[in-house]
Image (tube, rainbow, N blue to C red):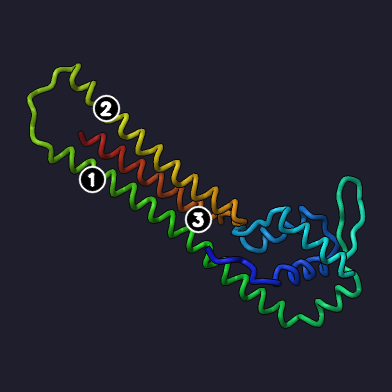
Amino acid sequence: MPPVFSHGDLRLYLLNLLDEGPRHGYDIMQALSDRTGGTYTPSAGTIYPRLAKLEEEGLVTKRIDGRKTVYEITERGRAEVAARSGELEGIQADLADSVRLIADEVRGSMREAMKSLRADLAAAARAERDAPPQTEPTPDDARTRAREQLRRAEAGVNEFRAQVRTDLRTHVARGGELAADAVDALIDRLDAAARELSRSLRDR
């Protein structure tokens, strides 16, 4: 997955956010999430060490406001932002490209997962249709086979759920956050797969 910020760009972007007005740490993290369409939400371990470094360099100051620590840019920090305005424009353009790449990658992963699920369902339906005719089962035999297939179906669904859950949690743990349209696409495809299965069951 491509990084959202290139090396050193996050430092300048933080200064730019503080140049817009004082902010506390959570507000900064939320602003970054909002401006990346939810595809990037930095952790406290990413933001606070950089704010501390900016404070050491005399570019920001901090003050306690109730339970919150509020960070403000200094005149020296404003001067750096003004001097590097051209770089900021480049960062904004790169940021937009990175967000698009991450969103496309997440959507692609979801499409592949749904394609695999649909293929598995279709293969199971074909195998059932192509199975050689058998003697009329007794009610007990039919129930036994139904329970066996139920266990297979549940195992397949659980495996799919576990894989998608792992992929999504890994993505978020690496500093990303899912875009709303990507989650909507996943929900729509799951709903489509459920409807397809329901139709298949009704036709039997």
- Disc 3 marks a residue whose amino acid type is Ala
Q: Is residue 31 above or below residue 191?
A: below
Q: In front: 161, or 35?
A: 161
Cα separation, mark 2 vs mark 1, equals: 17 Å
Q: CA distance from mark 3 to mark 1?
A: 27 Å
Asked whether the beta carbons under mark 3 and mark 1 sit within 8 Å of each other, the answer is no
| Amino acid, disc 2 | Glu
Of pointers 3 and 1, the one earlier in the residue sequence? 1
Mark 2 / mark 3, whichever is N-terminal: 2
2 or 3: mark nearer the eye: 2
Element type at mark 2: helix
Residue, disc 2: 148
Q: Judging from the image, what secondary structure is the residue with disc 1 in?
A: helix
Disc 3 versus disc 1: nearer the observer: 1
Q: Residues within 10 Å of mark 1 (few under 14, many from 20)?
A: few
Q: Secondary structure at mark 3?
A: helix
> What's the residue at 49%, 58% (across, down)?
106
Residue with the mark numbered 3: 182
| Residue 19 in picture, x, y percent from top left | 83, 69
Q: Residue at x 62, y 76 (%)?
A: 93
